Amino acid sequence: MTTATIAEMEARYRWFRDLDAEHRSWITLVAQTGIDGFVTWFADPDPAAPTGSDVFGSAPRELARRISLAQTVELVKTTIEVVETQIDEVMPKADRPVLHAAIVQYSREVAFAAAEVYARAAELRGAWDARLEALVVDAVVRGDTDETVLSRASALGWRSPAAIVVVVGRSPEGDGSQTLEAIRHNAAIGRVDMLGSIQGDRMIVILGGDGLHSETSTLGLVGSLASFFGPGPVVVGPVVAHLMEAGGSTREALSGYRAAVAWPEAPRPVSTHDLLPERALAGDGHARRALARELYDPLLAAGGGLLETLISFLDQGSSVEAAARALFVHPNTVRYRLRRIHEVSGYSPTDPRDAYALRLALTLGRLLSKPEPAKAAPRPTPIDARAVV
């Protein structure tokens, strides 16, 4: 029966013909073990419930990686058909119904055993993938991304998209692995790659996709995933172009996550750029330099009295008329300069939140500006005594 089964497999399936001699021998052993097990079980005068675990126990674990579950089903199905054909040829007609019923019962147990083997293999692969993903995310957090990390990410399905962001939030209650799978499913619907890991009380998610170039689209996507995070802020780092550069986005996202407690009214999710004032006050040097270089320096370089108008406007309690009197200009001039400040810096002095950032940028810009070197006092000209005489 084993020889007939292998011959039928070779005649039916090309994948079987393409196997090397070693894997063909293992499949032959599995088929022979299954047939011998059925004969032994059926010959027992008082047979217990048949078990199919011994059928696949004779094959190495690597066989489950080489032979798919669908191919294993084809193997079991072909073996049953060959055995039934052999029974119809050699057994009396009166004994055939009993044997067919026994084959159905035994093959059911073999099918359950095959499902168990592949389910266990899938669990092992899932656990290994989770550990590998955690290692990749940890390397990104530490800023230690190299070609090895990229190779591991590729093995997890990372396709190296052109736009990448890092999202940090509180880890959810319950099974974190199920939450990560739910995020992965929703990200896949949006054609976005995802890597994630839970590190203590925080969850870090790396997203990559061509639709993440703009801050609006990024916050929109993360907003659809924010419910999977635990309570508290969900902070989105800046967009970077490569996984090797994701360490910078992670650093800013973690800085924003630590500083977000100072802005309880922050939107969810919130970008690290919107948290620049809190990050600067929390001791983030990158945020301090960003406020000084991106807000103070452009206003200083623009001229036109913009910096003086901003200072006066803020000092006068955000009153246009009071600022105009202090500057000896018309109120419409102040309004024009306020619009120019918004155009140059991206922050509106009339918005309380933006005014807060601008006030802090003024202070930091002055502190971080290089002081002009003091001019040396001129050396006195030596007096010629003969000229005095």
Image (spheres, grey):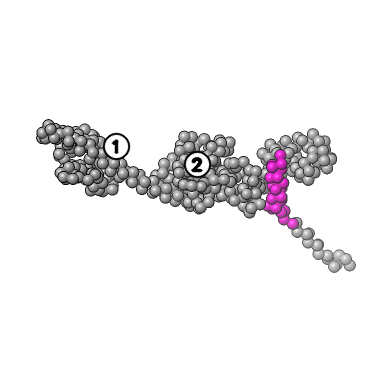
Q: Which residues are magenta?
A: 351-374
Give the residue type that dot 1 points to: Ala
In the displayed image of the protein, which residue is found farthest to the front? 46
Quadrant assignment for the N terminus: top left
Query: Residue tagged by mark 2?
Result: 207
Q: Residue at x 27, y 45 (%)?
A: 63
Where is residue 17 drawn, in percent x and y?
Answer: 21, 37
Query: Residue tagged by mark 1?
Result: 70
Of 328 and 235, nearer the camera is 235
Q: Residue at x 82, y 40 (%)?
A: 322
Of 71 and 298, nearer the camera is 71
Where is residue 385 drawn, in percent x and y?
Answer: 85, 68
In the displayed image of the protein, which residue is found farthest to the right? 389
Quadrant assignment for the C terminus: bottom right
**Element carrying mark 2:** strand
Q: What number of labels is visible?
A: 2
Of 328 and 37, nearer the camera is 37
Answer few, some or many: residues within 10 Å of disc 2's Cα (few below 14, many 20 plus, some between 14 and 19). Answer: many
